[in-house]
Image (tube, rainbow, N blue to C red):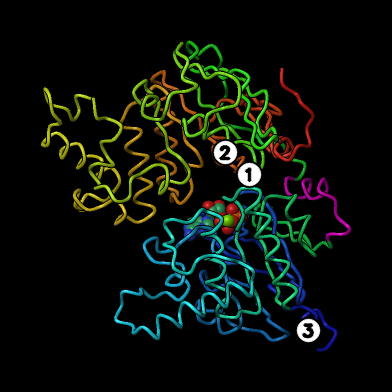
């Protein structure tokens, strides 16, 4: 068999099919990965990327197909089988234990466990050793809850690396990271390759793929195209393969006549840092009854802009006018009182107080509302009644409201914050990457709520790095690129996704006006 495609490839997935009920996630998909290469899988949302690699990692079972590893046909029935074959996978969503330290997370044991001091020291040493090897300098004793998203992602990766897999799969490891953090991860992928590993890297940021990949497989609608050698591909060609020629019709049609008065005006916002202009000329108007999508990759300035909207950063220039009032220099609490609600991306650091009780977290935005206040003091009964209602909506009715918020799982905390903000009944609700960690049902419910708010004449802003996550509800998109609004798309039912993505990566010239 030497010289056959079976021998030449480290990984070969052949004619793989997978259905989830009515949905066909994979239709005759193929993956051919050469040893000691970085192999990128690209494709738009729902193309089947995660499903394909989850089969390799033993998390999903394929309906039909073959898998060959190092020239040998294998059966992967479980994550354990996969690990034995030398495959390790870093999943799309973070799943660290927030209250454990870095070292504890790496080795999945709590140091409070009855481990002796020697064991503890060894754990720490092992953690340090592996971090040094991959040039990731984190403090092994830091609590994960205190880390940035980039650092958390590194811990996730280290956790997989410590098992010494020969094949490492990373499912969108950079999608939540800022530019610098993402660069770090890309550097790391290269160093893994230097160590002789085979790397499968899923991303929909084509600029990243072009930077690190040797070979590329494109996925579209459950099918695979490729592999292509990177040196023979341009970004444009990849686009075309990802989206095909078809034009996507949107369901929602933007109807300007149905919008109300101006609620928010952003005037010439600018943000400088150390002499660099990170945000410039950002101006737009939002009306009542509008859902505005803000899109842009990590380096685009979207997150910076969102932080300015939240009141977490003061702009270097420009104005924010909300309901006619200048709120440029008001803090988040003042903004809340004027009727703005916030769901930030990093809920553990910004959206909640982890050491405070669950009920305190629930009522933070309704402190002055009759929902919970009595004549002079907070009304305890009302607070508990209200908190119970919120917990029920989040599907965690059995949680004790007196427990600290940190006892909630990531997903529950997220649902709690989203429910809290919606129930706070703001005139404007601002979401930053709200889908992160939400299951599909919760995401659908969230979209329903957005539409309800819109119909009630409220306004919504939602930022996302995923261009098609909210297309079914958003009226209008603003695309950020290099710190500016590069283009605007009205959801008139005729824009196509490929053009949105092109704008996100800076392919489209300024087309606003
Ligand atoms: N566990 C599941 N149950 C039902 N449908 C699923 C499941 N996992 C994935 N899907 C569906 O399969 C398709 C492919 O999903 P996925 O592999 O996650 O795509 P990608 O990672 O490219 O975004 C999507 O339509 C998705 O909704
Ligand atoms: Mg995926």
Work out which quarter of the rendered image holds the C terminus and state it: top right
**Foreground disc of the pair 1, 3:** 1
* Magenta segment boundaries in residue numbering: 230-243
Work out which quarter of the rendered image holds the N terminus and state it: bottom right
Residue, x 82% and y 61% (percent of image)? 228
Of the residues under marks 1 and 3, which one precedes in the sequence? 3
Disc 1: CA contacts within 10 A as few (<14), some (14-19) or many (>=20) = many
The image quadrant that residue 479 belongs to is top right
> What residue is pinned by disc 3?
7
> What residue is pinned by disc 2?
303
How far apart, in angstroms, are the residues tagged by discs 2 and 3? 46 Å
Residue 174 in the image, given as x and y percentages of width and height:
62, 54
Tag 2's secondary structure?
helix
Instruction: Give the vertical position of 274 relative to 315 (above or below).
Output: below
Q: Residue furthest bottom?
A: 1
Residue 171 in the image, given as x and y percentages of width and height:
60, 61
**Foreground disc of the pair 2, 3:** 2
Residue 298: image tag? 1
């Amino acid at each position: 068999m030497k010289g056959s495609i079976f021998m030449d490839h480290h990984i070969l997935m052949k004619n793989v099919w997978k259905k989830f009920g009515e949905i066909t996630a994979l239709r005759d998909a193929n993956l051919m990965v050469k040893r000691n290469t970085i192999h990128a899988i690209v494709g738009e949302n729902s193309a089947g990327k995660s499903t394909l690699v989850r089969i390799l990692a033993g998390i999903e079972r394929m309906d039909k197909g073959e898998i060959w590893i190092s020239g040998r046909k294998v059966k992967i029935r479980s994550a354990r089988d996969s690990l034995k074959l030398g495959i390790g996978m870093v999943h799309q969503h973070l799943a660290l234990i927030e209250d454990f330290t870095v070292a504890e997370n790496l080795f999945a044991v709590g140091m409070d466990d009855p481990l002796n001091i020697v064991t503890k020291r060894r754990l720490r040493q092992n953690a340090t050793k592996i971090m040094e090897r991959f040039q990731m300098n984190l403090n092994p004793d830091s609590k994960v809850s205190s880390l940035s998203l980039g650092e958390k992602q590194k811990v996730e990766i280290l956790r997989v690396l410590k098992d010494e897999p020969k094949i490492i799969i990373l499912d969108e490891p950079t999608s939540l990271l800022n530019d610098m953090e993402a660069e770090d991860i890309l550097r790391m992928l290269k160093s893994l390759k230097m160590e002789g590993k085979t790397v499968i890297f899923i991303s929909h940021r084509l600029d990243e793929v072009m930077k690190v990949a040797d070979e590329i497989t494109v996925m579209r609608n459950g099918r695979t195209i490729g592999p292509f050698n990177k040196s023979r591909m341009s970004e444009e060609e990849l686009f075309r393969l990802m989206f095909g020629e078809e034009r996507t019709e949107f369901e929602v049609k933007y109807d300007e006549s149905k919008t109300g008065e101006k609620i928010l005006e952003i005037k010439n916002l600018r943000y400088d840092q150390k002499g660099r202009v990170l945000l410039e000329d950002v101006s737009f108007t939002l009306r009542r009854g509008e859902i505005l999508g803000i899109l842009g990759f990590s380096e685009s300035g979207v997150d910076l802009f969102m932080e300015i909207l939240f009141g977490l950063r003061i702009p270097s220039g420009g104005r924010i006018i909300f309901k006619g009032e200048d709120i440029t220099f008001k803090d988040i609490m003042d903004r809340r009182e004027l009727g703005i609600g916030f769901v930030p991306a990093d809920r553990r650091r910004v959206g909640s107080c982890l050491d405070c009780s669950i009920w305190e977290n629930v009522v933070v935005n309704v402190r002055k509302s009759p929902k919970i206040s009595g004549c002079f003091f907070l009304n305890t009964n009302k607070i508990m009644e209200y908190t119970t209602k919120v917990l029920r909506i989040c599907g965690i009715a059995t949680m004790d409201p007196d427990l600290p918020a940190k006892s909630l799982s990531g997903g529950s905390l997220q649902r709690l914050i989203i429910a809290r903000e919606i129930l706070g009944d703001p005139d404007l609700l601002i979401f930053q990457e709200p889908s992160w960690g939400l299951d599909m049902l919760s995401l659908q419910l969230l979209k329903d709520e957005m539409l309800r708010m819109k119909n009630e004449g409220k306004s919504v802003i939602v930022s996302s790095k995923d261009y098609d996550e909210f297309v079914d509800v958003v009226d209008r998109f603003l695309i950020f690129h290099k710190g500016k609004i590069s283009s605007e798309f009205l959801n008139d039912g005729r824009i196509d996704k490929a053009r949105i993505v092109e704008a996100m990566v800076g392919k489209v010239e300024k087309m606003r006006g």
